Amino acid sequence: MRALILVDLQYDFCPGGALAVPRGDETIAIANRVMPHFSTVVVTQDWHPAEHKSFAVNNPGTKPGDIVEVNGVKQTMWPAHCVQETPGAEIHAGIDRSKVTDLFKKGTDPEIDSYSAFFDNGKKKSTGLDKYLNERWIKQVYVMGLATDYCVKWTALDAKELGFDVWVIEDGCRAVDLHPGDGDAAIEEMRAAGVHFVESGAIGA
Ligand code: VGL
Ligand code: ZN
């Protein structure tokens, strides 16, 4: 059995959003095109309390892009984004909800960030996604969404480490590219870990 994980297809990661990923909105049509080919479709939602420690505004003296240590874990400072119950945190309305099986929220603990759909960045707490997939006899996991260099990368790497056969739908991802080349470097890192890459047009039933 295989599952599709749609990572953080939220307004704040689309052009005009608080943490806009260039051309992030182009992933919506691709998600809709591939969803019908999966019986299990998991959507993740970055869902931060306003006081989240990944926000530069909550760490006096820092600015977005800085890397600081928060509770012993290296943390990139971000503009406030995906704040719970705000429009920017909503899943893009262009996504066909009828094909979505379940939604996993992440980043809810104000003290630690969570790029991966499986664990927080300190690998202390699980979101329950691993168990969810195992209960459905899922062996292959397809990942796409936002952003290539953060949440897609860590979701794919954790899925691989958990023993799934992992495929990233490459044209269904866009990178933040805080530093030019970050997206490409993320792809190389995933490839080196044994993650496979596929184009959305090659996904069939
Ligand atoms: C993400 C930075 C901060 C992502 C989430 O979805 O890739 N990146 N929060
Ligand atoms: Zn976030």
Image (spheres, rainbow, N blue to C red):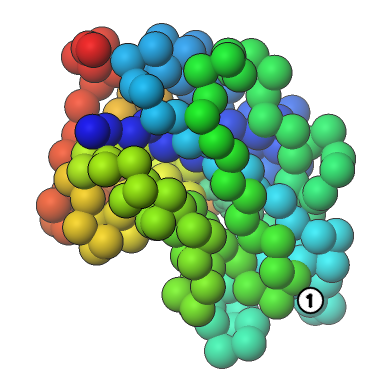
Q: Tag 1's secondary structure?
A: loop
Q: Is residue 120 above or below residue 195?
A: below
Which residue does the image show at 21% across and 43% down from the upper left?
Answer: 139
The percent coordinates of residue 120 (x first, y second) are 53, 68
Instruction: Note whether residue 115 is visible.
Output: yes
Residue at mark 1: 59
Query: Is residue 131 rendered to the left or right of residue 111?
Result: left
Residue 104: x and y in percent read 58, 46
Height in image: 167 above or below 82?
above
Looking at this view, name the residue that lies furthest to the front: 135
Work out which quarter of the rendered image holds the C terminus and state it: top left
Q: Quadrant of the N terminus?
A: top left
Q: Is residue 201 above or below residue 77?
A: above
**Which residue is more in the foreground, 132 or 106?**
132
User: Percent from the top left, x then y, of residue 20?
Assistant: 65, 37
The residue at 49%/67% (across/down) is 126
Residue at image position (53%, 60%) is 127
Q: Residues within 10 Å of mark 1 (few under 14, many from 20)?
A: some
- In percent of the image, x 74 and y 33: which residue is there? 90
Ligand 1 closer than 8 Å to label 1 CB:
no
From this view, report whether residue 146 is shown above or below residue 36.
Answer: below
The kind of residue tagged 1 is Asn
